[in-house]
Image (cartoon, rainbow, N blue to C red):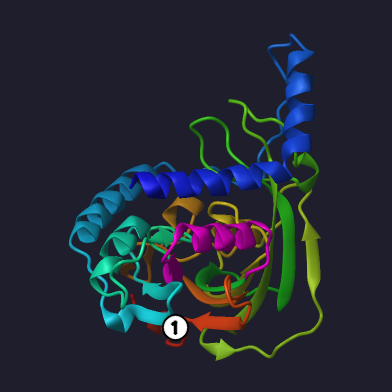
């Protein structure tokens, strides 16, 4: 576990290099003012609903229990060579449990295992485990520099979008002890209460289907640079499956941008997704890391790693898994 912490402290420090100018400017600004009522940027997205706290706590406890018993099998392996392997992480299991069970199935039992990427507890799909610290560092750097193309698929509930392809550029941040929120793009670099900073995030979305009917591909792309609250038609009940291509890798990025677009992910109670819908209860959000495209960290050969799609992608939202 200490190796894991060390690896991800490396990842975070690499990210911080990109925002160093913002840090320097903001800290100087803070030091030069004695005004206790410093004007902080205001979040655009709504905070988590009160009901989410208890639900998330219960989900975390259930995931901890499930993770303690979890073991990978060879059926979970999507790709493997002498340097790394990719696995299909199940929903409701912590990444650490996947990493812990890797030595039981890997072909080379003498390997030193590290996580190259992380997925949220309830996000399923492609996760890369490297077999040496050196390879892990290369992949973390590639993720940080946006050299790895990622695609996700999500089942959302809301009004049928009036777009087929859209890119959302915004700020991302949270106050001390607060929840992650969407901020205006112009707020990137500004300081938040507690000393953190608004950072940039950008996601492209494509509509896959609405109510089980596939949509035609569209070359016309709408672009939204977030400036303020988005005007949305309320109360939609359409099943909207979207494919998401995050350029940045911010925490809960896709979930936040789905909330901003008015199509929160089903089961994602923290970001106003439907918890109870059409007489059923949904435990955990329905978001799947579908594909990673990258240059191999050692051979430089291009590789594409795909995870099988969950049943909810093609069954009009009628399966819970």
Classify residue 90 as left or right of residue 231.
Answer: left
Closer-to-camera residue (64/170): 64
Classify residue 280 as left or right of residue 140.
Answer: left
Secondary structure under tag 1 reads: loop
- State the residue at coordinates (58%, 38%): 174
Q: Position of residue 183 (x, y in %)?
A: 69, 44
Q: Position of residue 124 (x, y in %)?
A: 41, 70
In the image, residue 234 above or below residue 299 = above
Q: Position of residue 185 (x, y in %)?
A: 77, 47
Closer-to-camera residue (164/279): 164
Q: Which residue is mark 1?
A: 309
Q: Position of residue 66 (x, y in %)?
A: 22, 60
Does 149 appear in magenta?
A: no
Identity of the residue furthest to the front in this view: 110
Residue range highlighted in magenta: 124-148
Q: Identify the image quadrant of residue 43.
A: top right
- State the residue at coordinates (51%, 43%): 9
Classify residue 140 as left or right of residue 52.
Answer: right
- State the residue at coordinates (24%, 49%): 61
Does 145 appear in magenta?
A: yes
- State the residue at coordinates (26%, 75%): 105
Q: Is residue 36 visible?
A: yes
Query: 10 Å neighbourhood of mark 1: few (<14), some, or many (≥20)?
Result: some
């Amino acid at each position: 576990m200490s190796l894991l912490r060390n690896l991800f402290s490396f990842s975070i420090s690499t990210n911080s290099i990109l925002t160093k100018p913002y840090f320097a400017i903001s800290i100087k600004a803070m030091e030069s003012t004695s005004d206790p009522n410093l004007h902080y940027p205001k979040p655009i997205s709504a905070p988590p609903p009160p009901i989410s706290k208890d639900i998330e706590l219960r989900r975390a406890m259930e995931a901890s229990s499930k993770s303690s018993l979890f073991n990978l099998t060879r059926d979970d392996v999507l790709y493997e060579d002498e340097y790394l392997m990719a696995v299909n992480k199940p929903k409701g299991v912590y990444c650490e449990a996947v990493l812990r069970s890797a030595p039981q199935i890997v072909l080379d039992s003498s390997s030193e295992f590290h996580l190259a990427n992380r997925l949220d507890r309830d996000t399923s799909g492609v996760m890369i485990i490297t077999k040496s610290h050196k390879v892990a560092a290369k992949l973390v750097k590639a993720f940080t520099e946006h050299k790895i193309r990622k695609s996700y698929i999500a089942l959302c509930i809301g009004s049928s979008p009036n777009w087929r392809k859209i890119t959302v550029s915004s700020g991302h941040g949270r106050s001390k002890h607060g929840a992650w929120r969407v901020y205006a793009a112009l707020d990137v670099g500004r300081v938040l209460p507690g000393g953190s900073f608004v950072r940039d995030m950008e996601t492209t979305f494509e509509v896959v289907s609405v109510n089980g009917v596939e949509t035609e591909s569209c070359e016309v792309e709408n672009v939204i640079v977030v400036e303020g609250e988005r005007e949305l038609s309320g109360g939609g009940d359409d099943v909207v499956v979207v494919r998401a291509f995050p350029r940045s890798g911010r925490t809960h990025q896709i979930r936040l941008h789905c909330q901003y677009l008015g199509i929160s992910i089903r089961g994602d109670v923290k970001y106003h997704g439907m918890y109870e819908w059409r007489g059923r209860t949904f435990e955990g959000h329905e978001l799947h890391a579908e594909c990673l495209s990258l240059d191999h960290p050692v051979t430089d050969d291009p590789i594409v790693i795909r995870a099988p799609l969950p049943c909810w992608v093609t069954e009009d939202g009628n399966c819970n898994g």
